[in-house]
Amino acid sequence: MAMWIPSFFRQENTAWLIATLVLVILNTLLTTQYFYKSGITSLPSPFVAATTWFGLSAIPALHACWQTQFVIMGVLLACLVLLKMDYQHEATEEVFLATLICCVVAVIPSIFFTGIMMLWSYLIAKRQMTWRVWAASLIAIAIRIVGMAVLHYMGWLQVIWMENIPHLSGLLWLLFGVVYLLSFLSIYIPLKRPSVGSGVFYLITIIILIFANLLWNGCILYNYPIKSIFL
């Protein structure tokens, strides 16, 4: 929590900070649940929760970027839904729900298209892509498109229109992707391949995140215009 305190003092509009903080808490719980439901941990692990929370909180540049946390929340929810797939039945319900989640959390068009392509590629790799499953996914996409068309036509809920959502720079999206990937791998590798090397990798990751936090706060303290790099 100490990593968030300076951001609250510096930010004039704390609404985005609070929204991001709530999403970070949810994503911490969802990541812990994913590791448990996928069988990587036998119980919901405090190690997973603590590392995820630390990783998602370490970079002050991302503290107001609720869009990144919103997208990863959708990814985690979709992954939890897809874990229920098995070879006993066609995964039409699971794929419909996972596709709908991807459609809802897509805050920019590139995420929408990338998410759908990755979902279909995953289904093909798992040999779960049948005509019925594909149709279920297309129906979910159609619901999203028709729903947004109705909202645009009626002029309702303009705040959730994709074009009205505040956009982040590509560098911020890249930074978040690197941070989350590092955090995920620093959890996954020690749990799946416990060794001295895994411990060293975990320690290096934590040191990098701590150094990045101190560097950002130091640049802000000495009025170095580091924010302009990410805008």
Image: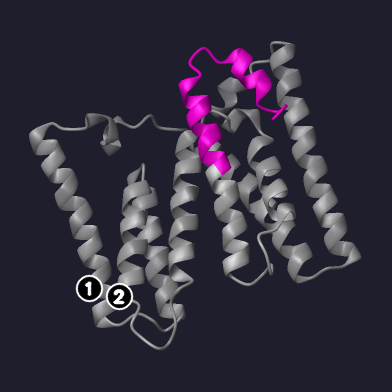
Q: CA distance from mark 1 to mark 2?
A: 8 Å
Q: Please, is residue 98 above or below residue 223 in the view?
A: below
Tag 2 or tag 1, which sits nearer the N-term? 2
Residue at 70% across, 28% down: 3
Of 36 and 8, the residue lying toward us: 36
The quadrant the N terminus occupies is top right
Q: Quadrant of residue 184?
A: bottom right
**Stretch of the chain drawn in magenta:** 1-25
Instruction: State the image quarter where residue 10 is shown.
Output: top right
Q: Is residue 8 magenta?
A: yes
Say what amino acid the circle numbered 2 marks.
Thr
Q: Are marks 1 and 2 in contact (CB under 8 Å)?
A: yes
Q: Circle 2 sits on which residue?
A: 92
Q: Is residue 174 visible?
A: no
x%, y% of residue 23? Answer: 51, 39
Q: Residue at x 43, y 52 (%)?
A: 74
Looking at the rendered structure, the kind of residue marked 1 is Ala
Q: Mark 1 sits on what residue?
A: 135
Disc 1 vs disc 2: which is toward the camera?
Answer: 2
Is residue 191 found left or right of 160 in the rendered image?
A: right
Identify the image quadrant of residue 102.
Answer: bottom left
The residue drawn where x is 50% and y is 56% is: 76
